[in-house]
Amino acid sequence: MALLRLRNTKGPNAAEIERKIKRGNALRQGSSWRGSRGLLALLLVALCACAVAAWLYLTSLDSDITETLARRREVISPQPRVYSVQCSEDYENYKRYPGCTPQKCGRAVTDGVVTSEEAEALRRLAERGLALAGSEGGASILDLHSGALSMGKQFVNIYRYFGDQIMDVFTEEDFKLYSSDSSYPFFTTRDVRGRIQTVIAETFGLDQTLMYLTKPTFFSRINSTAAKTQHDEYWHPHIDKETYGSFDYTSLLYLSDYGSDFTGGRFVFMDQNGNRTVEPRSGRVSFFSSGSENLHRVEKVTWGTRYAITVSFTCNPSYAISDPSLP
């Protein structure tokens, strides 16, 4: 009987202990779940923060412009608007030409060199030439000096490929417009080139007789079509002196208007303390020394078509090119 009473007295205690154990386990499991849930919430917050940071970084590639050097609606004339920068050491790696090799560097914008009528005439010339072919992607070029024309995913020589048919596209009058002929009623491209050369020389204190037109000098047409080859990927940051070697001074003559003919497509100088942009305007000339002091890119065109001419100059006479002429 004593043993039976002992078992009976232990029974209720054992049951109570078991209930406490189960309750403790349940509490620990709940605590563990709450801890896991808290950790999961922290991970989700961290992932969201990373996603937001990545989004901000990606959108900042085109939204971090800290200064607009020239807006489309303003007219910068008669004097160019000049922004001086310290020359890079790039030019030390090339033969120096006193009176031409950059000693004073920077970038400048002017609307007082080329008239809107001249720009419109040159745009029509570009449109006719580029209508012959064009890239499958969003960027096409026409180089009347070398004959290079974008066609699909490659380039062809416009003079050899089309032969005598080219006379149905361009005329002597077109090349008088593009080249030098004082009898033609418009200022000529050579005259335009000469005026661009003069304003660059005056801005940077050069002897313009020691500057030479160099390749590539070409018309460009850019739209929002997706790139098909690396030649269509015009938007990457680059340095002209490193890309082309012969360049000492780069200029762009815009043949269409930002905001009305196209969106995107602004020219962006990428400085260490922020980006600085030029909004294209038909007839506007933007020019700059070609070294790494002027790292730059072009925004992707998002709508419409952007036309321009790149006119480049070298100090090395062995890289000089002549004006184009019909075969």
Image (spheres, helix red, strand yellow):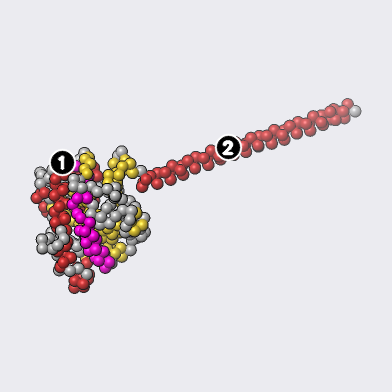
Q: Looking at the rendering, which quadrant does residue 101 occupy? A: top left
- Front residue of 107/30: it is 107
Residue drawn at point x = 32 percent, y = 57 percent: 261
Q: Residues within 10 Å of mark 2 (few under 14, many from 20)?
A: few
Q: Amino acid at mark 1?
A: Gln
Residue drawn at point x = 26 percent, y = 68 percent: 132
Residue behind mark 2? 38
**Horizontal arrangement in the rendering, residue 123 relative to residue 314 (left or right):** right
Q: Looking at the rendering, which quadrant does residue 41 occupy? A: top right
The relative height of residue 67 versus residue 115 in the rendered view (above or below) is above
Image coords of residue 283 (percent x, y): 23, 54
Farthest-out residue, right = 1
Image coords of residue 4 (percent x, y): 87, 30
Magenta stretch: residue 122 in it? yes
Quadrant in which the N terminus appears: top right
Sooner in the amino-acid sequence: mark 1 or mark 2: 2
- Front residue of 50/99: it is 99
Image coords of residue 264 (percent x, y): 34, 52
**In the rendered structure, which segment of residues is drawn in magenta?**
105-132
Q: CA distance from mark 1 to mark 2?
A: 62 Å
- Front residue of 240/242: it is 240
Residue behind mark 1? 103
Element marked by disc 2: helix
Q: Amino acid at mark 2?
A: Gly
Element marked by disc 1: loop
The relative height of residue 327 versus residue 223 in the rendered view (above or below) is below
- Front residue of 303/182: it is 182
